[in-house]
Amino acid sequence: MTRLVDIRLQRGTRLLLGALPIVVLLLVYLLASEARHLENPADKVLPTFSAMADAIRAFTTDRDPNTDQIILVADTLASLYRLGIGLAIATVTALVLGLLLGVMPLARAILGPTIAVIAVIPPVAVLPILFIVLGLDEASKIALIAIGIAPFMTRDLTNFVAGLPAEQFTKAQTLGANSWQMTIRVALPQLLPRLIEALRLSMGPAWVFLITAEAVASDVGLGYRIFLVRRYFAMDIILPYVAWISLLAITADALLLWISRRGFPWAHGAGR
């Protein structure tokens, strides 16, 4: 008798099964939307696919008065710029601190408690402070993303490095390696795929912080546009924007996974 845990699926089958729930959800939405519009043609809660198509056509052709770019392009570029800079700052910070704290117990004893305290502070709670200190421009939005995910990534990377087999460092010391060489040649190569994995896990929270900051104080961006049109109950715009954000997030995650598998195949087991 074949156990469920022993079933292995081909790639095509996995893709088909993965797409099935999405198709079902779309069909359910289609039926519910059509039913609501039969009762009330002016319903805005569940816009029809044709209404969303008209909205998509509008914000992919109309231009934003602030940037003179197509609205969707202007919003996407602004959001990706903020997200990219925030993620870059958080990644570099987490990499440096993760190596330092993971390799050196003294540094972990000094800085570990502080990072642990920062990690449990809700990042959105410090947003007003960031606006006061850094102003309402790009710096505060980027800082929220960096502050929101850097502590989590740092703790994850620190625990990973600290959990590496002690024999590896002992052998390196036997061969005459100093602290710097052990960090760069022993810990860093093994940490890089973990860094990419931590970055993938941080993408979701990073988008939340970005949209939150844009909703509070911004004049362009994906989050700004969603919160701008919500006062008009423009679900025909909100839903496509949410779908576009999801597509961007999925694309970024797939790209990071591809980089990890191409750059560090040894870190990925068979069947993943």
Image (cartoon, rainbow, N blue to C red):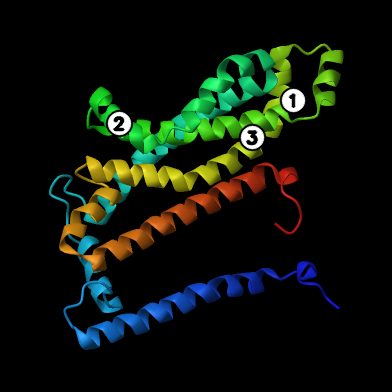
Say whether residue 199 is visible.
yes
- Dividing the picture into quadrants, the one containing residue 234 is bottom left
Please report whichever mark, 3 or 2, sits nearer to the chain's N-terminal start.
2
In the picture shown, does residue 247 fall above or below 53? above
Closest to the observer: 44 or 97?
Answer: 44
Q: Is residue 20 left or right of residue 181?
A: left
Which numbered disc covers residue 79?
none
Estimate the spatial distance between the alpha carbons at disc 1 and disc 3, rounded to whole Å.
Answer: 11 Å
Say whether residue 79 is visible.
no
10 Å neighbourhood of mark 3: few (<14), some, or many (≥20)? some
Please report whichever mark, 1 or 3, sits nearer to the chain's N-terminal start.
1
Q: Is residue 35 left or right of residue 84?
A: left
- The residue carrying mark 3 is 192
Estimate the spatial distance between the alpha carbons at disc 1 and disc 2, rounded to whole Å.
Answer: 36 Å
Estimate the spatial distance between the alpha carbons at disc 3 and disc 2, rounded to whole Å.
Answer: 28 Å
Query: Which quarter of the image is occupied by the N terminus?
Result: bottom right
SS at mark 2 in the image: helix
Farthest-out residue, left: 65
Closest to the observer: 145 or 172?
Answer: 145
- The residue carrying mark 1 is 186
Q: Nearer the viewer, mark 1 or mark 2?
A: 2
- The residue carrying mark 2 is 140
